[in-house]
């Protein structure tokens, strides 16, 4: 995996980052691809709006149903896909750095499973209004993350301890989830299962705008502590000798990673695989050995927006797939391809 | 090597702290020898089997069960014991043994104590095939679920192996796991879509997914026994090579171990064992991950002993979980749910006890 | 401990912020209490499960976003141009297929309706049950949304109370009376056909991996069985975990001791598996030919006026046998 590339220092705020020219190219290419996805998302739909009217709607010169469909439905949905994808990619990078494991994601500390438990309780036992479900999901996810973190601190302070405790807690919670799903009324169980897939169906500005505002702070924090985080990957002692406050950096990464995931989960449910795959795909595209939050965010944004477009339009007829189904299938397939390609490239020795 | 976050870096070996725990030198921790421990474990297993024959939804006193077993009981007791409890106990035994041994092989093979047979795509493949059968082919039969689950587990594991052997050289353990995770994710997306978009299929899948040993007749078990036996033999054959493999692939090669043969043997064993177990009971959490850990804690890093202990510990966990599930709720709690509840606290205790190790 | 405390604090603040922006919907009104007031503008106000809503006097293009409601609107002769789907993936239940108009379209599923497809149908009224709340903000942009409460006074799913509410929303109260009279007549006719009054009946769902004994008064059988006076529906011998049905463990199959068992089959294989069990073979209903088999699963579990006719057909065939 030698991709020397051109490496030059880029000054960003008070911190110096090493950014390769290849990374810049990759992010630019992802931006162009995302722009194409945005245009397609705005133009396509079962309610036909002519291109001219789409432009008029966006510039505020259209009235009526076409304006509502484009401005109030399609636009917030694609913006949410981009923003949520970026947040999940960033959260994945934080957790993969923290756990020093490419399978690290907020899922390893049980967040998604705990959030699903919360949502299941809300949907099956509390009537399942949107606000109740969102609140219960965040509560369930956050409680799980806190329990895992505290239990892992008791046991071992390495990232590995967190993973192991996370696996244990996740297993119990998924057992609780299957039990509730199995016992519940079929209709409620189905609603809960749909929630568990993750979907952007019906997101509107009133949910997207506050979510994006809330996502900005943890996103920025992860980027700011990233230099310390990469040093931490070399081990606590080595990092400390270079002036990194290990525990504080770790807490910032965990809390921000959980917050990013929590906000997305509250609005759209636990969208699978973006947090796991985006940092890895980004690392392979840019040819860097480690994960990096900004390229991971760009990859995540494109991945989620493209997946939502595919889920809505690729299957024709009346079949619309929740975005979480597409991200899992597509991200998985892409990762398969990457594994194959890497196996081919490896020199025979 | 500064960052361990690339796929090959972190998955091929456990993090440094973990690697110490993998090979503990701890002779003082075992007051009993490994053989005596094996005897005690076997005794515990016998107790679990007895409990599985005595406890159930039908209110039968132990004397009736004994009478039925010796051929003297009432007709109802005879039916309950011989047609329901004995097959169910055998199924629990087979599933526990298969999953625990498969887990032990998996962890040895990829040298990662977090590995679980599911990582090779066994569960994802089985679930995908069952979902296709239920949602697209309209299958509604436990026997056919088992056939589809077994076929899915086998084919998807082969697929994962093929994908990662795209070069002449055998794939690294890390690539195998990454390939398994990737294929698993891709399939699980389609599986969810298939089940959720068809409410009746979803209703079937939510029961299959919980993993259950209820209503497993002896007819469903017998066809899978040859696969289980072959898988077990292969696992034990490969056991001694795993000790060399634990030192790293290059060191193992230097010691004369046939790395690629061991790996292929191991993968075939995992597929047969975990595939059969999933075919019998659906996905059962935690046994494959958990029991090799307990075994390692009891006997240290020798993989032959780990596999032998896993073969006894796995059935104990599944039998006890199934017995608890039978009486926990009136409609029976599925065994896959109870294993997670029983297994997770044990794993947490193990994580804690690991801290004090050298 | 500071980081942890601040994390949970942030989570709470975050959650309440999100809760605040999601709960702009109306407060739930008492179930089933619908009152109509006529206005000059061609609309009138009805009480729905999610508060008062202005609906058209005589809706001409109704879309239902709760698949079970399709049986209600078609039974009331309400022009229904679209519905979300439930059965067998992207299909209308067979007994409703000939009741929908030619330009009828399926518009996503109950949990995730396809808003643009609904918009393209240009509906003048959208009908759903109380769970439509989570999609209310978007649906209200398309047309007025009238939500009925699924549960009757006993807290059970009951298509008859739902029918009354949908009749209020659409102004089709006369049709509702006729549907209910038809149903009462069908039940009376079935009752008259019971040869041994007082016989016990168990509605049993035969699934691939277990059987379910449905509780009396629940959704099963479109309320045909529990409306009949000449049969009794025993309580299950195994307690229910969800108030709708009990899962009967294999060891307790011998407690299904009723005169008649309605075996509602998921598949023939599932029934074959059940028939191979010795405890099943020993049941009085099995020995005396008292088991009636039906494959009309959709009608038995979905409920509704048309479904009740299918169920009544099954019951009639069984009692005549």
Image (cartoon, coloured by chain):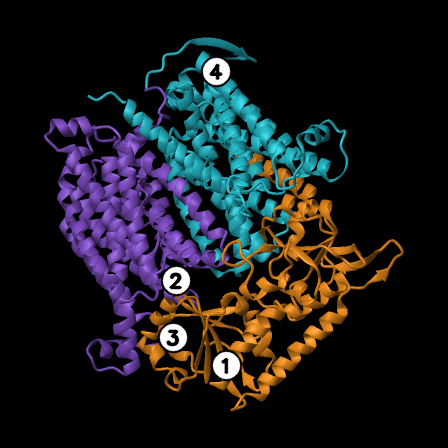
Q: Name the residue under label 3.
A: C252
Q: Marks 3 and 1, how far apart in space? A: 28 Å
* Furthest-front residue in this view: C102
Colour chain B appears in: purple
**Camera-nearest label, 3 or 2:** 2
Task: Of the two numbered discs 3 and 1 on the same chain, state the one appearing first in sequence.
Answer: 3
Residue that numbered label 1 is attached to? C317
Checking the image for residue B140, the label placed there is 2
How far from the left and from the top, in percent, is residue A48? 65, 39
Q: Can residue B157 be seen in this view?
A: yes
Q: Is residue A239 left or right of residue B114?
A: right
The residue lying at 39 percent from left, 37 percent from top is A163
Identify the colour of chain A in the image. Answer: cyan
Which tag is nearer the camera, tag 2 or tag 1?
1
Quarter occupied by the C terminus of chain B: top left
Which dot, 1 or 4, sits closer to the camera? Answer: 1
Q: In which quarter of the image is residue C93?
A: bottom right
- For disc 1, the chain is C
Residue named by callout 4: A25
Give the residue drawn at x 51%, y 60%. Answer: A184
Chain given the colour orange: C
- The alpha-carbon separation of the residues under discs 1 and 4 comes to 73 Å
Q: Furthest-left residue in view?
A: B256
Tag nearer the camera, 3 or 1: 1
- Categorize mark 1 by other alpha carbons within 10 Å: few (<14), some (14-19), many (20+): few
In front of the other: A30 or B319: A30
């Amino acid at each position: 995996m030698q991709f020397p590339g051109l490496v030059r220092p880029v000054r960003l705020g008070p911190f110096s980052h090493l950014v390769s020219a290849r990374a810049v190219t990759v992010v630019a290419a992802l931006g162009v691809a995302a722009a194409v996805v945005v245009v397609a998302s705005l133009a396509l739909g079962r309610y036909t709006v002519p291109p001219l009217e789409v432009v008029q709607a966006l510039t505020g010169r259209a009235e009526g149903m076409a304006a509502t469909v484009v401005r109030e439905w399609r636009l917030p949905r694609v913006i949410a896909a981009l923003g949520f994808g970026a947040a999940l990619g960033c959260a994945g990078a934080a957790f993969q750095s923290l756990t020093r494991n490419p399978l690290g994601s907020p899922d390893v500390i049980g967040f998604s499973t705990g959030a699903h438990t919360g949502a299941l309780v809300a949907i099956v036992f509390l009537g399942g209004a949107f606000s109740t479900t969102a609140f219960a999901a965040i509560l369930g996810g956050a409680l799980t993350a806190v329990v895992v973190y505290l239990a892992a601190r008791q046991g071992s302070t390495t990232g590995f301890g967190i993973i192991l405790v996370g696996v244990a807690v996740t297993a119990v919670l998924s057992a609780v989830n299957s039990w509730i799903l199995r016992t519940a009324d079929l209709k409620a169980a189905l609603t809960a299962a749909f929630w568990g897939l993750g979907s952007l169906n019906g997101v509107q500005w009133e949910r997207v705008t506050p979510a994006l505002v809330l996502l900005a702070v943890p996103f920025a924090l992860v980027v700011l502590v990233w230099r310390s985080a990469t040093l931490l990957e070399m081990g606590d002692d080595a990092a400390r000798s270079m002036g990194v406050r290990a525990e504080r950096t770790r807490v910032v990464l965990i809390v921000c990673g959980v917050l990013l995931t929590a906000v997305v989960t509250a609005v759209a449910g636990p969208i699978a695989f973006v947090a796991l795959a985006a940092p890895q795909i980004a690392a392979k595209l840019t040819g860097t050995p480690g994960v990096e939050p900004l390229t991971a965010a760009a990859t995540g944004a494109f991945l989620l927006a493209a997946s939502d477009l595919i889920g809505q339009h690729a299957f024709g007829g009346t079949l619309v797939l929740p975005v979480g189904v597409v991200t899992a299938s597509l991200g998985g397939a892409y990762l398969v391809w990457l594994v194959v390609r890497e196996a081919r490239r490896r020199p025979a020795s | 090597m500064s960052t361990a976050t690339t796929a090959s870096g972190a998955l091929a070996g456990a993090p440094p702290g973990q690697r110490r725990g993998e090979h503990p030198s701890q002779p003082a921790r075992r007051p009993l020898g490994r053989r005596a421990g094996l005897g005690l474990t076997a005794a515990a297993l016998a107790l679990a089997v007895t409990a599985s024959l005595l406890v159930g939804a039908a209110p039968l006193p132990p004397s009736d069960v004994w009478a039925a077993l010796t051929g003297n009981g009432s007709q109802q007791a005879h039916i309950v014991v011989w047609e329901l409890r004995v097959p169910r106990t055998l199924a629990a035994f087979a599933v526990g043994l298969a999953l625990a041994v498969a887990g032990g092989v998996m962890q040895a093979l990829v040298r990662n104590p977090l590995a679980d047979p599911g990582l090779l795509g066994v569960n994802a493949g089985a679930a995908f095939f069952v979902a296709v059968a239920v949602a697209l082919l309209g299958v509604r039969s436990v026997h056919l679920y088992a056939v589809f689950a077994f076929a899915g587990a086998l084919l998807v594991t082969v697929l994962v192996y093929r994908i990662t052997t795209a070069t002449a050289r055998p794939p690294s353990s890390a690539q195998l796991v990454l390939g398994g995770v990737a294929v698993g994710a891709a399939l699980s997306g389609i599986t969810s879509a298939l089940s959720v978009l068809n409410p009746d299929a979803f209703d079937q899948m939510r029961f299959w997914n919980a993993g259950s040993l209820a209503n497993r007749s002896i007819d469903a078990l017998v066809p899978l026994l040859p696969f289980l036996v072959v898988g077990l033999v292969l696992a034990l054959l490969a056991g001694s090579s795993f000790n060399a493999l634990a030192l790293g692939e290059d060191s193992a090669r230097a010691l004369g171990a046939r790395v690629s043969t061991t790996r292929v043997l191991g993968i075939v064993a995992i597929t047969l064992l975990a595939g059969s177990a999933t075919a019998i009971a659906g996905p059962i959490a935690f046994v494959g991950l958990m029991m090799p850990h307990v075994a390692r804690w009891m006997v240290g890093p020798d993989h032959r002993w780990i596999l032998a202990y896993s073969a006894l510990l796995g059935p104990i966990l599944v039998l006890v979980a199934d017995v608890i599930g039978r009486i926990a709720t009136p409609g029976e709690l599925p065994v896959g749910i109870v294993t997670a509840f029983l297994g997770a606290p044990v794993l947490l205790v193990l994580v804690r006890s690991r801290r004090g190790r050298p | 401990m500071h980081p942890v405390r601040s994390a949970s604090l942030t989570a709470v603040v975050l959650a309440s912020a999100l809760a605040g922006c999601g709960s702009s919907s109306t407060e739930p009104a008492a179930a089933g209490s619908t009152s109509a007031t006529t206005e000059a503008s061609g609309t009138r106000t009805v009480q729905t499960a999610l508060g008062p809503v202005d609906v058209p006097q005589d809706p001409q293009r109704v879309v239902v976003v709760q698949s079970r409601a399709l049986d209600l609107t078609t039974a009331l002769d309400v022009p229904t141009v679209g519905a979300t789907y439930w059965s067998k993936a992207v299909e209308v239940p067979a007994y409703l297929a000939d009741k929908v108009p030619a330009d009828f379209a399926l518009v996503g599923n109950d949990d995730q309706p396809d808003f643009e497809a609904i918009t393209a149908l240009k509906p003048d009224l959208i009908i759903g049950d109380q769970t439509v709340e989570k999609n209310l903000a978007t649906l209200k942009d398309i047309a007025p949304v009238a939500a009925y409460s699924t549960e009757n006074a006993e807290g059970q799913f009951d298509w008859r109370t739902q029918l009354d509410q949908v009749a209020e929303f659409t102004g089709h109260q006369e049709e509702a009376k006729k549907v209910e009279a038809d149903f009462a007549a069908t039940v009376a006719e079935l009752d008259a056909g019971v040869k041994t009054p007082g016989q016990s009946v168990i509605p049993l769902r035969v699934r691939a991996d277990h059987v379910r004994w449905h509780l009396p008064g629940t959704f099963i059988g479109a309320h045909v069985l529990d409306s009949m006076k000449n049969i009794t529906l025993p309580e299950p011998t195994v307690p229910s975990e969800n108030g709708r049905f009990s899962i009967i463990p294999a060891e307790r199959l011998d407690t299904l001791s009723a005169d008649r068992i309605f075996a509602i089959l998921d598949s023939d294989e599932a029934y074959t598996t059940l028939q191979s069990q010795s405890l099943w073979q020993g049941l009085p209903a099995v020995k005396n030919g008292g088991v009636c088999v039906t494959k009309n699963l959709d009608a038995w579990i979905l409920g509704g006026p048309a479904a009740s006719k299918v169920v009544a057909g099954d019951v009639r065939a069984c009692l005549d046998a």
